[in-house]
Image (spheres, grey):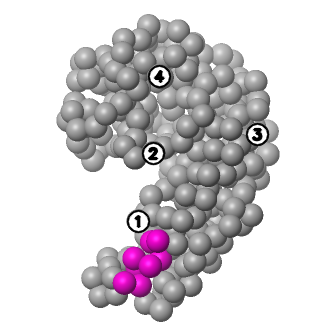
Amino acid sequence: MTKLERVRAALTRQPTDRPPYAFWRHFPEVDRSPAALAQATLRFHERYGSDFLKVTPTGGYAVQDWGCVESDEVMADGHRPCARHAVNAPEDWKKIRPLKMESTGWADHIETIIRCVVDRRADCPTLPTVFSPLSLARKLSGDRLKYDLAENPRAVTDALEAITETILAFADACFHLMFDRLAALPADAWNWDDRRAGPTLEQGKAGVRGAVIGGLDQWTTLKEGPPEKARAEAQDAIDQTGGTGLILGAGCVLVNDSSDLTLVELIKSIGGQVRLGLIKPQ
């Protein structure tokens, strides 16, 4: 099966020749440059041969044009926390208006996606990173979101409408760039931190259509190993789902110092292929 065929089979809960898998990570050294990020993403994909390629931009790409400023501090999973929020008082929600795709952060993400899609190394479905409106509201406001939802709900919901309109504009731009499909409700595939936050893959699969993505703990197993533990988690994921409707992967992005040995041995054990390639951007 091709990677696309394998993913499509998982989405429709059909048998596959081997368990499909996918891993992705942040590249904080280069993720503020679309060209450099595309190359780092493609090198990572070339190394591990995932069945789909996820483009992972800087975590603040979607909110920087509303006034959020990222810190230069890089966290363990490669993202940078917000150094200055755009919403610091209830009246600030009024400043959150729909953005055009010419805005820097969104345009950079689209450019990175295009650079990946047109490259011969992108031999599989390519997925953008798109946050939910509520996730972006949290990025915009930090800890005050819960308070404002309770005390100033109209201000927040008006901002959520503007955020949603911006996300839809991004999706529309991707469609016009001839992407076959982006996430729609209900979704065809679901990824969450099943090992840390739950629910289990078995529980999640029972509640959604399409494929579930996960099974591997990115914080411990894929970071510290040993490979035997990763293989056990993979087998457990297969057992939970019956081996269909499953794409093996982590609960989210890989920690930057994830174990290459563990990933390689895991991928080999399920019939995948790895190649000698550059992992860190040069």
How far apart in space, not on screen, are marks 2 and 4 (Cα)? 15 Å
How far apart in space, not on screen, are marks 4 and 3 (Cα)? 23 Å
Is label 2 in a helix, a strand or a loop? loop
How far apart in space, not on screen, are marks 2 and 3 (Cα)? 23 Å
How far apart in space, not on screen, are marks 4 and 1 (Cα)? 29 Å
Is label 3 in a helix, a strand or a loop? helix
Q: Amino acid at mark 1?
A: Leu
- Could you say which quadrant of the image residue 147 lies in? bottom left
Marked residue nearer the N-terminal end (2 or 1): 1
Q: Which residues are magenta?
A: 154-161
Depicted 200 relative to depicted 264: above or below: below
Marked residue nearer the N-terminal end (2 or 4): 4
**Residue annotated with mark 1:** 134
Quadrant of the image containing the C terminus:
top right
Nearest to the observer: residue 128 or residue 257: 128
Q: Are marks 2 and 3 in contact (CB under 8 Å)?
A: no
**Residue annotated with mark 3:** 115
Nearest to the observer: residue 9 or residue 90: 9
Tag of residue 184: 2
Marked residue nearer the N-terminal end (2 or 3): 3
Q: Are marks 1 and 3 in contact (CB under 8 Å)?
A: no
Q: Amino acid at mark 4?
A: Arg
- Could you say which quadrant of the image residue 14 lies in? top left
Q: Amino acid at mark 3?
A: Arg
Residue lying at 55% horizontally and 59% vertically, measured from the top left: 167
Q: Is residue 99 left or right of residue 205?
A: right
**Residue annotated with mark 4:** 8
Camera-near label (4 vs 1) is: 4
Depicted 157 relative to depicted 120: above or below: below
